[in-house]
Image (tube, helix red, strand yellow):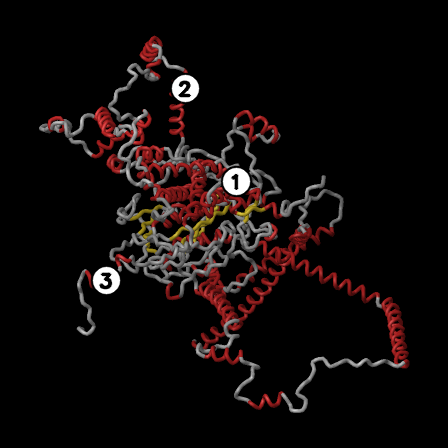
Amino acid sequence: MVAHRKKKYSTGEGAQFISRKAALKKLQLSLNDFRRLCIIKGIYPREPRNRKRAQKGAPGIKMLYHIKDIQFLLYEPIIWKLREYKIFNRKVGRAKAVKDFKAMRRYLANHPTIKLDHIVKERYPSFIDALRDLDDCLTLCFLFSTFPSLPHIPRTQSDLCRRLSMEFLHAVIEAKAFPIVASYSTYTIGFMPEIEYGIFACCYYYQAEIKGQTITWIVPHHFSFEPQSKAEVDFKIMSTFVEFYTIMLGFVNFRLYHTLNLFYPPKFAIMDNPNEGEKALADENIFVAERVAALNIPLSKSVLGGEEETEIDNFDLQENAEATEEARKEIESIKVLKNLFKGMKFFLNREVPREPLVFIIRCFGGEVSWDKSLFIGATFGETDESITHQIVDRPSMEKKYISRYYIQPQWIFDCVNTRSLLPVSKYFMGEILPPHLSPFVDKDRDENYIPPEERALYDQDAVEQMHKEESADESDKESPNKEEEDEEDLNENFKDVEVSDDKKVKLGVTPGQIEKEAPWKKKREERQEYKLREKMIKKKHRNLYKSMMNAKRERGKQAWLLNKKRKLHDEKEKVKTKSKKKINN
Amino acid sequence: MIPTTNEKKKRVSKKNKSSWRKHIDTKDVDDFLEEQRLEQRLGEPFEVLKDEQLFTVDTTPKEKQLSTKEKKRLRLLAPPKCFSMLQSHSKVPDPIAKRNRVRTKDERKCPILKRKEIERKFKGILKYREKQRIDDRKKHDDEKLKEVENDKFCKDIWENNSKLDSDEWIDKVTKRHTLRGTGKLNKIIPRMKTSKNEHVSNIETPHPGISYNPSFKDHNDLLIEIAEKEAKIIKEEKHLNRVTKDVFKKVPAGETGASWLEEMSQGLPNDQDPNDEIEEYPGDNPYKSVNPPVENKKKTEKQRRKQKEQILLRESRLLAKQEKKKTVEIHKLKMIKAQIENREKKLQKQKERKEKLKMFKSKETKQLGQLKYEEPDMVFSMREDLTGNLRNLRTKGSLLTDRFRSLQKRNILAVTARHHHKKAKVKKFVKPGFKDDWKKSVANINICPTMK
């Protein structure tokens, strides 16, 4: 007996990959079903290391899947549903063809449904995983919610997208009321929307931090639907993605609502005792959906209770004193952010995009309303005297109230991005707006030279500082010198004390003195520790670290040089203006 | 004399019984009997019957007029036409008068049992199977009710319900073992390395220049970036043109034939130059062999000796040279070492560079299908399109396309081109019957160019 000869491609890369056609045969699915299954299960084609071997010597480029991926699909229960669906289609088709409408109706009533709950759980084993991957989900849901019914995109799908995305916005709005759990060393923020906005040529970009996960999503501008050419995008595939994402977003919403002590599906306090006329008008589902879409009506809570104030426990732990302090500062800044628009009453004119503005204002604690005929859920009218800001996007208005500011919508976005209330003057009606800067640029990249004019764009404090400096130059130059002198005096006094101590060396008990640690010693220690830590960097990352530090140093040098040049230039200019002034005088 | 065969015999013998049967004509009797039998089967012929028997005068409608739908229903009730062949059409009565019929299931039942059954049903006592059927039906209906629709989310899928599952002190194997009886087996999901490109973020940060109201610097930066890209593309295009299109000489269409003829007739005798012919064949010796005969020249003794000496000398010189080289190489050892080191260093560098390249490549978008991913053009608006406020905003680009491309970039989707179905080319022709010109035959228009 001779040992069997090993067949080519029975091991190694040749055995690891399977072509799409072979996979279809193995799974006994049609191409469309396979595509759908792959998208739902999150299995993508792969690029092998050696294509020739992976394709078993076949020429050309084939779409390859990992054999384990396909085996994983093989055990998926929804494959049976897909097959059932195939048979269902066949039955309905037959009944329709022979005009057996009774049977057809019966079949249609018992249509198979594909449940994706277990796949959501399988792909995202924990809630955090799901949040981490929410970007695509939200973007597509927001996008599809603007679609009419198209071939491959049923009306129900876009309706569901609309419902879920609005519910998610509510969750983000409500999240600020969530108690922040903070211990002494690490400040784990349970839930905090840190939202940044950018309006770009085609859409709004939002970024919020939920449970420590930064979530970015894009919302298209609210314009009428523009048909897309089929050549660019495969609608069927996108629709399948959305099919999965809606299920995922639904469960994420459920969990978010429950962590926020809200009812899911959302409920409103008005629903308990609605006006009878209103209820008679609308179906309850539509009633709720409209109010959810309004974004203006707070949801009713499952557990009633006032807003809990977050407090940090004051443990006297010296090691972490600094960390606690930092945490406290952080929490305070968050508290300020939460109430950024508190006490303000906004009114939106009809030409202003309602949804994004209402969402932002509500997130930061403002009150908002709009024209009654514009959308459901308006709480006060334009005639309300207590309105502080009216958001307007037209060059002029006929009737104006003195009691309120007429500002352009960009003010809201810029306030939120700079995290402070900006002066209104630049944003008045008809004014040419300052540029809307992207919040996504890496502002924190250190050691970069930013000319003071540019810094003023980002930071309002810098402007004030510049002004102060200018004014300080002229008026009081003497005061800082005085302070310095005082300090010197103090130091001299200390020296005297020390000298006098040396003279009296006698027995006796003298009050002990607190040993003062020299600041340079501490600094040196820190420096040493830092160096040691640098040494601990793994070999893998060492080169990267080195190049990073070098680049930083280089940038620092450049920035220093440019700063110096600027300073010299400014001084020269100042001398010039002074001399001019003198001449004028 | 031979009698003619064609002629019929006038007289035939009917002597025997067989010959009688052979020659007797029974057609009239047969016809009669056949007619009688047909009469028996179908009844009397129409000729014999009177008009009253054939027709009835319809004075009042016996049945009301049926609608097509009702007729269809009735037709559905009737036995299918395909079985009509199985039914008897004969009017001849069945010869066996007392034929046993197969009784139906109901008829075969014992009358006592039947009575009992009716009593049981009247009392409402159900059999086991009947009970089960009702139960099953109910269960199915309940399940249907319970099966919530897909868009109703009413459970927390991430909630860990079982205490056993969340207990960190219990071993993994024990958990599986104890869960086996509960009907909810812990499904082990294989930890597969996802093939999606994780180096590309889901939503890439937008360039600040595409803001609806960008600062001058940001917008300028964006435009410069785009212009640079465009310049690169133009340069590439120019290069390709230079290398391919411009390399070849452009010849007008009419001249190609002439140039071809000229090229092909190169080297052939030309009638116009008679001088060439004369030069090629100079007068005296018109014949010259291609391979003239070889002379066998012998070397002299001296020549042979000299040749041998030369060979020996050459060999000895080579040997001496090799010996010298050996001694030199010993002194050269340092240099050789340095050479090897250099080479190794070079190889090391190459290896490092290769690894670096590999790392960069791993971050790139991979090619999954026949087409390669190409970075889409950047979206931007020109300075005159920027209005500076939301009201007059002009949108550029499409979010859906952007998302679709992003999925392709992250290797979640393979890049594919839209498949165009080729329509079969069908040759059209006019059937001969339809060939005539309708203008002439139908409309009777006489188109005459001279009339105009």
Seen from the viewer's position, the closer of residues A297 and A531 is A297
Mark 3 and mark 2 on one chain: yes
Q: Is residue A563 above or below residue A52?
A: below
- Residue occupied by mark 1: A73
Label 2: few (<14), some or many (≥20) within 10 Å?
Answer: few
Residue type for callout 2: Gln
Occupied quadrant, residue A447? bottom right
Chain assignment, label 3:
B
Q: Nearer the viewer, mark 1 or mark 3?
A: 3
On screen, residue B288 versus residue B119, left or right, reads: right
**Element type at mark 2:** helix
Label 3: few (<14), some or many (≥20) within 10 Å?
Answer: few
Q: Nearer the viewer, mark 3 or mark 2?
A: 3
Label 1: few (<14), some or many (≥20) within 10 Å?
Answer: some
Q: Can residue A422 be seen by looking at this rendering?
A: no
Compare marks 3 and 2 and give the one earlier in the sequence: 2
Q: Is residue A357 above or below residue B325?
A: above
Residue type for callout 3: Asp
- Residue occupied by mark 3: B437
**Residue B132 - label:** 2
Residue farthest to the front, as pictured: B1
**How many numbered marks are there?**
3
Seen from the viewer's position, the closer of residues B143 and B86 is B86
Residue for point 36% across, 34% down: A107
Residue for point 51% across, 63% down: A450
**Element type at mark 3:** loop
Chain assignment, label 2:
B
Occupied quadrant, residue B318? bottom right
Chain assignment, label 1:
A
Residue A60 at x, y percent in the picture: 55, 55
On screen, residue A252 versus residue A279, left or right, reads: right
Q: Quadrant of the C terminus of chain A?
A: bottom left
